Amino acid sequence: MSNSVIIGQYVPGQSLVHRLDPRLKMIMVFLFIIFIFLANSWMSYLVLTLFALLSVVTTRIAPSFVIKGLKPVWFLIIFTFILHLIVTKEGDILFSIWNFDVYSGALWKGLEISLRFFLLILMTTLLTLTTTPISITDAIESLFQPLKRIRFPVHELALMMSISLRFIPTLMQETDKISKAQASRGVDFRTGTIKERLKAVVPLLVPLFVSAFKRAEELAMAMEARGYKGGEGRTKFRELKLKPMDVWIFILFIIVLITFWILRT
Amino acid sequence: MSQPNDISFQNISFQYPQGDEWALKDVSFHIEENEWVAIIGHNGSGKSTIAKLMNGLLTPQSGRIHIKGLEVNEENIWEVRKKVGMVFQNPDNQFVGTTVIDDIAFGLENHGVQRDEMLKRMKYSLEAVKMEGYENHEPHNLSGGQKQRVAIASVLAIEPDIIILDEATAMLDPIGRNSIMETVDHVRSERDVSVVTITHDLNEVLFADRVIVMNDGEVWKEGTPREIFNLHKELGEIGLDTPFVTQLSNSLKSEGIVLNQEPLTHKELMDELWTFYSRT
Amino acid sequence: MDILFENVSHIYQKNTPFEFKALEEVSFHIPAGSFAAIIGHTGSGKSTLIQHFNGLLKPTSGHIRMGDFNITAEKKVKDIMDLRKRVGVVFQYPEHQLFEETVEKDIQFGPKNFGLSQDKIDSRLPEVLKSVNLPEGLLSRSPFDLSGGQMRRVAIAGVLMMSPDLLVLDEPTAGLDPRGQKEMMDMFSRVHKETQRTTILVTHSMEDALKYADYVFIMNHGKLVMEGTPLEVFQKEEALNQVGLAVPEVIKFLHAFESRFGQSIPFKGQSIQELAKEMTEIVRRGVKDE
């Protein structure tokens, strides 16, 4: 039994960033991403990068851990950079490798796009590192509230998300159990041709689906027995309240954005 | 009867849509206020169907069900579900919240309880099931018994008049089972609430004031645990076991030992033997 | 199958903050042909232990010998398929593993994976169906149309088809009603006796261990804390209580009887009627003495 199933990448903590209202956090990340694409001068990039690094430091999560979290995208970032070196042909020729000319424009462009990409991934990673999935769900429910007017099922969507989060570890444990049971019946998940391996997945998927449906049925009954009848007339236990600190941080963020705007060319 | 019963079933018959036999045939019984009733019977005897009829999860084809004088029908169903709390068999498939506290909140939110009232009720219901300090635990880090205790706490928070445990201990280990029975016993000592346990665990039956034995969709017998286990042989015929003490005292009786009352516990049987032994 | 564990430990997620010692220095020997019971409450390391029997897990240290197979941390288990062919595991709620369209196909699934010939499968099937008490008429049905108890028998039939040398049963009666539990255990007892194979039963039920096993192991916090014949182990009421286990009711009663009447009735597997007879003698003697 491994009880260390981690959903998302949340790292528990008590830092300023952790405690920041999840709605504000999401809005800030959203605005930040838009502004990344509006940056057009060295100085404006510098402001964004400094802010991002400041955020990393404030989370009190070891930078090495954050870097490790970016691992899957390092490749993409480097790949984008090299791609730009190859295809962009602007500015002066800086140097040549194997008859291949590298232009100064390409270097700048490559650096710029890679930096944008890096900042984008870094900030969204920080969001998931410092916010529990359930808080993100709460924030979405709260932010999408206005959409209720156009009959968008905000409450149902949020409930669906939180139930999915609740059942991910359960289903992971179940997958482990069933795959072990089938391995004991001679199923080999590890070796064989692609076709054989795909075939080996059937004995795993069918029982998983059967059990998931059974769970869903029982859960629906339990929810009904506990008085669930949709969002109507429901009160809410989890409530998001803005604290003075949240407001201050947001003001700071706006100042950063204004500085950024001024430094654009 | 001067005061209304907590639960009354009048001539209830029920058939599942796909089933070709009646799951319940003309079943009538009452459960009094503050009573603990155990419903036993082998699988397919109709005992779990009864539980689901009590709060309108199923609707009978004929007959009437009243909860606290309120008829269970389309109109009253949400009122009824406030009065009847239910704990199901599978600990995982009734845990809705991502954490313990969220799970208790779920029922309270459904019933529109205000937030400050919620906090009060959460506190005492967690205390009642001895799960204080587990507020932020996630379900996959809890044992089956702990999850079922949270389920009981969730039910208690709604302040129901009746708690139904529908084979709530069937999937637990002995430690989990004991903890659930102790919890229910403890809850009953602190507040007025009727308990209906649907079970095939004989030791759970001993906690009850009264036992209803179901067989093939009919009420086969009603009585105190003592009266029911007295029917040792007949129970065997409908596929039910009796506890060790009952079996032993029956064998002792056939050896000619006179027992004054049907013993239910080790101690009772030992005392009877001692009485017999020291009699001159 | 002769089973030997020597200082076997298993640590989950070693060298991480989540490190968890599930088995600690476990050593024991189960001779071929015996019916052993492993008892311990949830989290005692039982499930981790049984996953070592067919190589689903390897020990992090120590040495395991399953018949001719050797399992250690370093080595890859040679012919793991062969080991799994000879060790049949009935997991908890085995009905959850069914997936084929028909009962027949599901029963044949394991045997086919292990390369049993169709002839052999066909010749064994009727016998296996008989021992798990499933009518042949069910073979063409979908396993998902059956009752829970029948589904479990289908899953067990699939394991018995391999006629394994070792049969590992992980709480095979969980969730059944008392009659179903008794039928299930009687079936395994019969299967054990008929074929002279080794059976390992993982259970919470002291009564079952007493009734069916000829050797008992008690696990607690990943360690093997007691072992012996059921009669030896269940004499130690206090030691068992300390690890959160109770002795079977019958023994508990006999202990109480002894302290009340000053005369012991040694338990050697008597039926309730026989015990009643012995008690009656003692109790009557008391009446005469006075």
Image (cartoon, coloured by chain):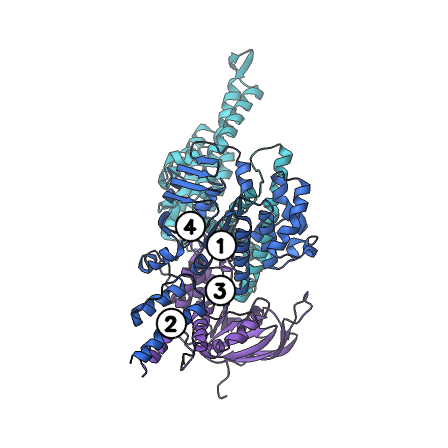
The kind of residue tagged 1 is Glu
Instruction: Give the residue type at disc 3.
Output: Ala
Dot in front, 3 or 1 = 1
Q: Is residue C203 visible?
A: yes
Task: Say which of B40 and A123 sits in front.
Answer: B40
On the image, numbered disc 4 is attached to which residue? Answer: A21
Label 3 marks which chain's residue?
Answer: B
Query: On the same chain: label 4 and label 1?
Result: no
As drawn, C268 above or below B272: above
Measured in 3D between alpha carbons, the distance from the residue under mark 2 to the one under mark 3, in whole angstroms, is: 37 Å
List x then y, in percent, for residue B116.
40, 65
**Secondary element at image label 2:** helix
Q: Could you tell me residue A219's position as x and y percent?
A: 55, 59
Find disc 2 in the rendering and name its residue. C279
Cβ–Cβ under 8 Å for marks 4 and 1:
no
Spatial CA span between label 3 and label 4: 39 Å
Discs 4 and 2 carry the same chain letter: no
Q: Which mark is residue C171?
A: 1
Chain letter for the purple colouring in the rendering: B
Q: CA distance from mark 4 to mark 1?
A: 47 Å
> What is the quadrant of the C terminus of chain C in the image?
bottom left
What residue does disc 3 label? B168
Between the C-alphas of marks 1 and 2, the distance is 33 Å
Mark 4 vs mark 1: in front: 1
